[in-house]
Image (cartoon, rainbow, N blue to C red):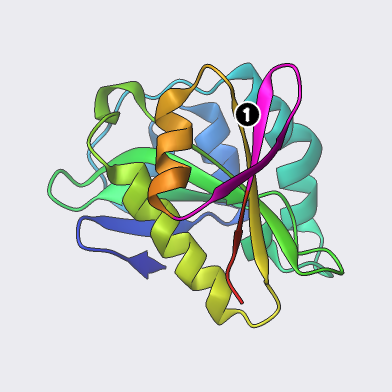
Amino acid sequence: MIQTERLTILPLAYEQLEKYIRNDHSLEIELNLNTTSRVISEELKEALAQTILPNVADDSKNYLFSTLWTMILKTENKMVGDLCFMGEPNEKGEAEIGYGTYEEFQGKGYMTEAVRAMIEWAAEQGHVKTIMASTEKTNEASFAVLQKNGFQKYGEDDVMFHWKKEII
């Protein structure tokens, strides 16, 4: 668990991920949270089914680099967004981060705060040297989060900008 000024960032265990996917408020009930409206994108559903759940179930992997971390707004006791690493760092010490803020909580700086905390957490793990991220070229809010956290654009393709931040 990671604490920031406004957020608690909690890594979800396998059974909690299953509740998250059901989106029936059972996760909020388990965590003693107020309910919030959240939509699970098709992209996230696919990632959960094909990558996140299998990796979290694999005892040979550090699940903290595979699971979804939920952001809980302390003042409202509600989930406001999620982050994850896309698996353990590679041999160069690179780990990719992904994130999303629930619509009603966007534009309040929560993701900037959460990404900063996740970078600090990753740096403390000792073997992460670079955090990578990709954003759609049209998602200005997403690349603003990265820029505010010191990421530099290093490449692009037709639809995405690619970013990195050296942490060691």
Judge whether residue 39 can be spotted in this image. Answer: yes
Screen quadrant of the C terminus: bottom right
Magenta stretch: give its range. 150-163
12 over 98 or under it: above or below: below
**What amino acid is labelled 1 in the image?**
Leu
- On screen, residue 107 versus residue 159, left or right, reads left
Q: Position of residue 17 (x, y in %)?
A: 58, 44
Q: Residue at left 20%, top 62%? A: 5
Judge whether residue 29 can be spotted in this image. Answer: no
Q: Position of residue 108 (x, y in %)?
A: 22, 36
Q: Position of residue 6 (x, y in %)?
A: 20, 55
Query: Badge 1: few (under 14), some or many (20 or more) residues near its Cα, within 10 Å?
Result: some
Q: To which quarter of the image does residue 109 belong?
A: top left
Screen quadrant of the N terminus: bottom left
Q: Residue at left 57%, top 49%? A: 152
In this rendered view, identify the residue nearer to me: 166 or 67.
Answer: 166
Residue at the disc numbered 1: 44
Q: What's the magenta bit mostly, secondary-structure-wise?
A: strand
163 over 7 or under it: above or below: above
Q: Residue at left 36%, top 47%? A: 112
Q: Residue at left 58%, top 21%? A: 137
Q: Residue furthest left?
A: 75
Q: Is residue 82 magenta?
A: no
Q: To which quarter of the image does residue 60 belong?
A: bottom right
